[in-house]
Image (tube, rainbow, N blue to C red):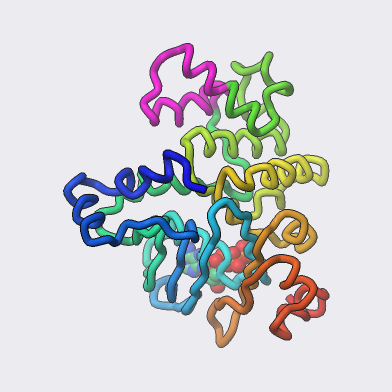
């Protein structure tokens, strides 16, 4: 289901209306069932290939988990989806990533605009060293919201959305760094959601947290289903099984990361097609 923001997405990603018009005219912009369509993606760092020939369709509104042993290219894959990879010196990307039909590597796409639509949350919570309120007002101001009343209402809304409002409503002017790790991570997710993304990328969002905080963040991720397209890297297979609609297993093959298996979670965990998947989920490999 497309919301208004997604419907306007291609234009918002592009620098100039004439380019958007040209793409629309050439029928390159059209709605696809997949939110993200990755075709023959390859990545190298300083000439060393680390990911090869990955093709995958990520369904809109679903949660897709990326699993696999350390170094198989999960983070690299994730960072191609919103072009965070552009920030790594010496990185080179080949192939295509299409977001609702738009090639995100098109020259006309503005990476900063893309990253608003495709937000990212990292392993270690990274709130700004500012108050809780300011952490959220900053992205809201980026959206052009200036009215004090609207800013207050939006701050409350995103905190409600991540289940933090009751915990922090009487301490909004306290430093975000004084929150627990789990609260900081939920605040970082709130900060990402404040920019009204269509897609949220999460790179091992629970692995730096204690079990209780991890559970709270996991519950929050599960609640994003339907409203956002979510791609999450996790080493926690039980977590992938609990929250993901689809699972992608990556592996290092011939010294380079590759996609081994991709499919519905239930199928990957109970009837895997590949021996490596079977061995990995049974704990015999990886
Ligand atoms: N900035 C970089 N410069 C050079 N090589 C890199 C860089 N980032 C990652 N790599 C290499 O690319 C390969 C894939 O790394 P990546 O972090 O994507 O794997 P991963 O599956 O996410 O690993 P982990 O589960 O340990 O986080 C590894 O061999 C890694 O050493």
Total residue callouts = 0
Q: Give the answer, above or below, for where 165 lies relative to 208.
A: above
Tell me which segment is drawn in magenta.
130-155
Decide whether residue 135 is among the magenta residues: yes
Question: In the image, residue 133 lies at what x, y percent?
Answer: 55, 21
Is residue 104 visible to us here? Answer: no
Question: In the image, residue 50 lies at what x, y percent?
Answer: 50, 75
Q: Quadrant of residue 178?
A: top right
Question: In the image, residue 155 lies at what x, y percent?
Answer: 55, 23
Residue occupying image coordinates x 65% and y 36%: 186
Q: Give the answer, above or below, for where 54 lies relative to 146.
A: below
Give the camera-side residue of 140 and 210.
Answer: 140
Residue occupying image coordinates x 53% and y 54%: 60
Decide whether residue 267 is among the magenta residues: no
Is residue 78 visible to us here? Answer: yes
Q: Give the answer, above or below, for where 147 lies relative to 29.
A: above
Question: In the image, residue 68 lies at what x, y percent?
Answer: 67, 70
Q: Residue furthest left?
A: 18
Q: Quadrant of the C terminus?
A: bottom right
Judged from the image, the quadrant occupied by ligand 1 is: bottom right
Which SS type dominates the magenta stretch? helix
In the visual, does 259 lie left or right of 109? right
Q: Quadrant of residue 17?
A: top left
Residue occupying image coordinates x 57% and y 76%: 259
Residue occupying image coordinates x 41% and y 64%: 97
């Amino acid at each position: 289901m497309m919301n208004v923001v997604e419907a306007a997405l291609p234009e918002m990603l592009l620098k100039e209306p004439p380019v958007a018009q040209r793409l629309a005219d050439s029928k390159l912009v059209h709605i696809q069932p997949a939110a993200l369509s990755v075709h023959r993606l390859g990545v190298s760092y300083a000439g060393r290939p680390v990911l090869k020939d990955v093709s995958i369709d990520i369904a809109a509104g679903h949660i897709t988990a990326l699993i696999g042993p350390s170094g198989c290219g999960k983070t690299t894959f994730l960072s191609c989806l919103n072009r965070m990879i552009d920030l790594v010196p010496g990185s080179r990307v080949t192939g295509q990533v299409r977001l609702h039909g738009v090639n995100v590597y098109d020259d006309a796409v503005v990476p900063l605009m893309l990253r608003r639509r495709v937000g990212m949350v990292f392993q270690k919570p990274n709130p700004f060293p500012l108050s809780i309120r300011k952490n959220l007002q900053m992205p809201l101001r980026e959206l052009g919201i200036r009215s004090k009343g609207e800013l207050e209402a939006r701050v409350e809304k995103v905190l409600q959305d991540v289940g933090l409002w009751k915990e922090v409503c009487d301490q909004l002017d306290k430093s975000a760094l004084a929150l627990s790790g789990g609260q900081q991570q939920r605040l970082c997710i709130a900060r990402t959601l404040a920019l009204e993304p269509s897609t949220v990328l999460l790179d091992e969002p629970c692995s730096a947290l204690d079990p209780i905080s991890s559970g709270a963040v996991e519950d929050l991720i599960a609640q994003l289903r339907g409203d956002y397209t979510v791609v999450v890297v996790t080493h926690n297979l039980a977590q992938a099984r609990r929250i993901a609609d689809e699972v992608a297993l990556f592996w290092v093959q011939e010294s380079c990361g590759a996609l081994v298996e991709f499919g519905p979670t239930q199928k990957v965990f109970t009837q895997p097609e590949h021996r490596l998947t079977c061995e990995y989920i049974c704990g015999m490999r990886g």
